[in-house]
Amino acid sequence: MTIHTISPAPLAPAVPTRGRLRPLGLGDVRITGGFWGERQDVNARHTLAHIGSRLESEGWLPNFDLAVSGGLPEGRRGREFSDSEVYKYLEALAWEIGRSDDDELEERFRAVVARVAAAQEEDGYLNTRFGRPGQGERWSDLEWGHELYCLGHLFQAAVARERTRPGSDDGLLGIARRAADLVCGEFDADGRDAICGHAEIEVGLAELSRVTGDRRYLAQARLFIERHGRGSLRDIEWGRKYFQDDQPVREARVLRGHAVRANYLAAGAVDVAVDTGDAELLKALRRQWERTVARRTYITGGQGSHHQDEAFGDDWELPPDRAYSETCAGIGSIMFSWRLLLSGADPRYADLIERTLYNVLATSPAPDGRSFYYANTLHQRVPGTPADPDGTSPRASSSLRAPWFEVSCCPPNVARTLASLDAYVATTDGEGIQLHQYAPSSIRTVLDDGREVAFDVETNYPADGRVTITHTGDADKAWTLSVRVPAWAEGATLRIVTADFVQQRPVEPGVVDIRHAFRAGDVVQLDLPVTPRMSQPDPRIDAVRGCVAVERGPEVLALESVDLTSLRVEDVGRVAIVPGTAPVERDGRVWVSVTRLPVGEGRWPYGEEPQSAQTEPVEVALVPYHDWAQRGPSTMRVWIPLAP
Amino acid sequence: MTIHTISPAPLAPAVPTRGRLRPLGLGDVRITGGFWGERQDVNARHTLAHIGSRLESEGWLPNFDLAVSGGLPEGRRGREFSDSEVYKYLEALAWEIGRSDDDELEERFRAVVARVAAAQEEDGYLNTRFGRPGQGERWSDLEWGHELYCLGHLFQAAVARERTRPGSDDGLLGIARRAADLVCGEFDADGRDAICGHAEIEVGLAELSRVTGDRRYLAQARLFIERHGRGSLRDIEWGRKYFQDDQPVREARVLRGHAVRANYLAAGAVDVAVDTGDAELLKALRRQWERTVARRTYITGGQGSHHQDEAFGDDWELPPDRAYSETCAGIGSIMFSWRLLLSGADPRYADLIERTLYNVLATSPAPDGRSFYYANTLHQRVPGTPADPDGTSPRASSSLRAPWFEVSCCPPNVARTLASLDAYVATTDGEGIQLHQYAPSSIRTVLDDGREVAFDVETNYPADGRVTITHTGDADKAWTLSVRVPAWAEGATLRIVTADFVQQRPVEPGVVDIRHAFRAGDVVQLDLPVTPRMSQPDPRIDAVRGCVAVERGPEVLALESVDLTSLRVEDVGRVAIVPGTAPVERDGRVWVSVTRLPVGEGRWPYGEEPQSAQTEPVEVALVPYHDWAQRGPSTMRVWIPLAP
């Protein structure tokens, strides 16, 4: 494992002190447009303002003012974890300021930090829900109080700020450090032998140790990781696995329990494993990732099958119509996978990140960036009801996107991820560049030997499978550009055009290393076949037996009732794909040949095989899953039955 | 619709003042053994004592003593609805005393009534959770407080007692009337325009009006029914449909929301519709039953697909592995169907009752009557953990039966249903007897013209399909004996043997009327074919596409992992039925031919069709679903995939 000694640190979330790969960060990578550039733009122009406005109107930011004025606990509004939304908003602002250097956002950022700063108590404690007369005592409800969880998000915000504006005088890093010092004093090896009911402090502390160089924070993160699985939290109806307090992290074989908690804990555990050189722990986490991906992940990359406890189900329990697939669980999965990718360079981690980005992260926000999905169902049986644009929705809504939720973790989580997305595009191993995600972008960095390398990426991906990498700097000796060929991209080709030669060859899924002393104008062109394809589920996934899903490149497609008018059927539940037919692309859309599903006409739905006639096949168009529910209430399904 | 003027009233739950059929009740029907007789015996000997003991040790009965001693609210234990479990226990005792005339149970009954009586306040109010200093105000939390719900169960207990021991001096009917009078004063047409968040008061008041003749109670029940669907309860995360407050009862098209609430409300609404002659309301309820049975009911008769809100899902949303199918919802469905059967005589209601009795009610209690299922899953993916015999389990447990639950509605609900089961066997229309359920039993009643009719039923049903009805009295003119041929019983035959003739003929599913002046010794013999059969699901039930279930008579069968050892597979998830094979009966068990399910070996479970080889077919035995999980932890499935 390489120990990183690079300075300055990359402008990126998750900058481990060792590992195979290092993120390049916002300083070295700039997404310049395309699928993600447009979404980052909407995020910067609309989503951040929307979140800021809701944090005010819901009272979650004013709670900090009440802490100063003495208006707590009477005047406090919001759930016990509402402080964390303010911190995620700060983190999103920090990354966006790092990207765009926007003065207005900078002003907003400083104003919010000032209000947070004022609420911090003298000894460093910071939470609007606990500790004052009339409130619960500090750390008195570790199962549900979320105090450490909130601080973890505070630390991530402070880290984002310090990485993008090192040494800034806004004071956020100081606030974080004082709070972290208090946490270490309270919970260190001689202190309270306890953990938080919602993991997050671990990843926050590990990252804080990286920007401050203070190893106490890393040690504290490690303690929290190691304390999971000892049953220190009270048992609850869903069992201690809900909190991942059922089994030590290094003994677990799969992610389980609450899907956001599980992924945040796993991400923090990778940080600890990598920074402390704990190969055994890292191996355990890789094993957990393998089984989770093989048995507990939706085709969209979404995770979590239970609405009741927002949790993973058992192996193979992946109902499309009750998919919870929380947006935040998808983001947590990206955090976990990204850290494993940095530690070990296996392209399968980047494959899952890509899948989750296109089919969970991109699905959550509406095109205007002002409403969101919290849960991301794969089958909507009844049309949803449009959400009140001024209201809040129950958190588990999976009908139509809503502007805000009573539990509103997802909107600011989407915002901070989009604002830092440039950092997930490429990495360096010191001797070359690894390109993991394809977006129009400009990349410029310095290798370990001091050579500058630079190239631009042009692509219409995923609409088109061609990725053109044009070098803009001259190298005097060879270095390695590595490109990822996604697992689905059987039949990809690579073409290299330099002043001296032209080379074209087929490439297999995985990583393709191209070692060359690239000169300005040299082009590497990757062609990924984005022909639509049908995918079958493993037969152990009972809920989608006898169905297929259609995918195109990294995008999962869906059948939406608004596209069914030609067939005169009431909803997507009455449609089946004609066996032996393949999806075709025409007029910029993907079409499949369907017929009416033969159904029983009985009054009792079990008995003889239904014999009702099938109709003549007709073609219907599919829509990328991330674009569904943008044309009014509809029904939708990703998994489509094959006609008998 | 016939208006009943029969006196004395039958010893039965649900005695409508009009309708096509009248229950015969415990006085006229006696189950004498067999499948249900054994379970009634265990219920009387063990379950009632078990419940009584737990009501003491959990503090739910002592709460009534605390109400007297002034120990409330500090000392109160249990959830807000715990009083209702005491009342269901009283109802179960009342029926059992009616059946067996047991002195010890009578003593227990009176002792409990005395403690309840002492807690009633002067104005008739009765609840241990509200109304005292330090507690919430009366009726201040109609969404979740369950005060009216608890009283509904009190009324049902008082009705059971009054029907089985008319005019008893124990005082329970007086307690109920005082509480009912208070409710009418508070909630009548000039009073509070409100409903309870959990339906039950409606059925309780309607029945109380029947035993007392006081039409005010019926009017109040009607008011509560009519007030549903006006949104008087606060909206919640799952919507007002959870409480059935989303839509007026007479406008709804299907049962929805919390499955127990929905069925209790529907049962009460039938009572109101019938007793007030409201044909429109009755028609609406029949329509709701039709659609609920056609689209929202498991093959077991179980209802409710959501763990989160214990609720019905959308049409066709019937996941076997997340089947909630709460025992109490099954009992509520029996209550609803029974009332519709009485009102209209359609044998399909009795069909569903039979299915639910054998596959939900019989599944809940363990053979020893001391542990229960709360939820009744149709697919257990991981072996359960045996419950602590002295502990309580989370309410949603679907692994192994548990002795008690934090929400322990199911055990006393099972107990009261088993204790009154004789009343569901047969009815009269005044001119004849309708036999709905087949159990060894003795039936003796008086027709409207004063003639006594009597017969014994002998059967080993459902192990065997032969039902032998031997007349034990002489009739001087013809009367009609009607027997139900279940919908599954294609190929049934009927044989009549009298002194004068022997007749044998095939009979179709439905009702078979036999009009004859039966003499003692005359025999009617019904042969129902209980050959095992495979059932296919309607293709709109996505979750079980490509699977079959095996049924035998009224019993649904299941594949349990303890029967799979010969196949060397880890669990039921790896097994598929060989297409084209049929289940066979041998050595008293049903066997199916299975092979290993071919599965993918990949690390990502979506893509190409798996090509792994199938194994040689082997035969494995199935178990009646109600008998599963009696041989230690296991995995289980009702729906078995067909091999590709």
Image (spheres, coloured by chain):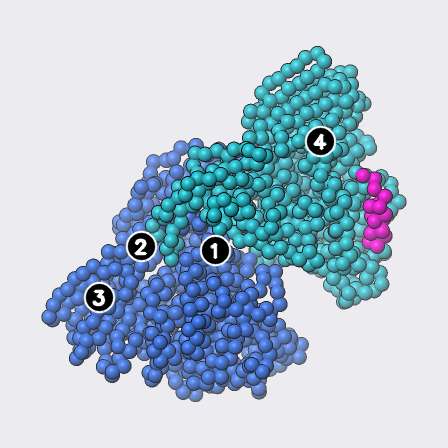
Chain colours: A cyan, B blue
The residue wearing badge 4 is: A440
The kind of residue on which mark 2 rests is: Arg
Q: Please state, as top left, top right, bottom left or bottom right, where the C terminus of chain B lies in the image.
A: top left
Q: What's the residue at 78%, 42% (across, down)?
A: A96
The kind of residue on which mark 3 rests is: Thr
When asked about the image quadrant of residue B500, the answer is: bottom left
Protein chain holding label 1? B
* Tag 1 secondary structure: loop
Say whether disc 3 or disc 2 marks the residue closer to the N-terminus. Answer: 3
State yes or no: discs 4 and 3 in contact (Cβ < 8 Å).
no
Seen in the picture, residue B22 relative to A375 is either above or below; the reply is below
* Tag 4 secondary structure: loop
Asked if residue A60 lies left or right of residue A619, the reply is right
Seen in the picture, residue A27 relative to A186 is either above or below; the reply is above
Q: What's the residue at 84%, 60% (across, down)?
A: A68
* Tag 2 secondary structure: strand
Protein chain holding label 2? B
The residue wearing badge 1 is: B315
Provide residue A562's location: percent of width, then percent of height: 55, 47
The residue wearing badge 3 is: B468
State yes or no: discs 3 and 2 in contact (Cβ < 8 Å).
no
Q: CA distance from mark 3 to mark 2?
A: 20 Å
State yes or no: discs 1 and 3 in contact (Cβ < 8 Å).
no
* Tag 3 secondary structure: strand
- Per the rendered image, the range of residues in magenta is A100-116
Specify few, some or many for label 4: CA neighbours under 10 Å numbering under 14, 14-19, or 20 or more. many
Q: Please state, as top left, top right, bottom left or bottom right, where the N terminus of chain B lies in the image.
A: bottom left
Provide residue B258's location: percent of width, then percent of height: 52, 63
Q: CA distance from mark 4 to mark 3?
A: 81 Å
Respond whether the residues carrying marks 2 and 4 are from the same subunit. no
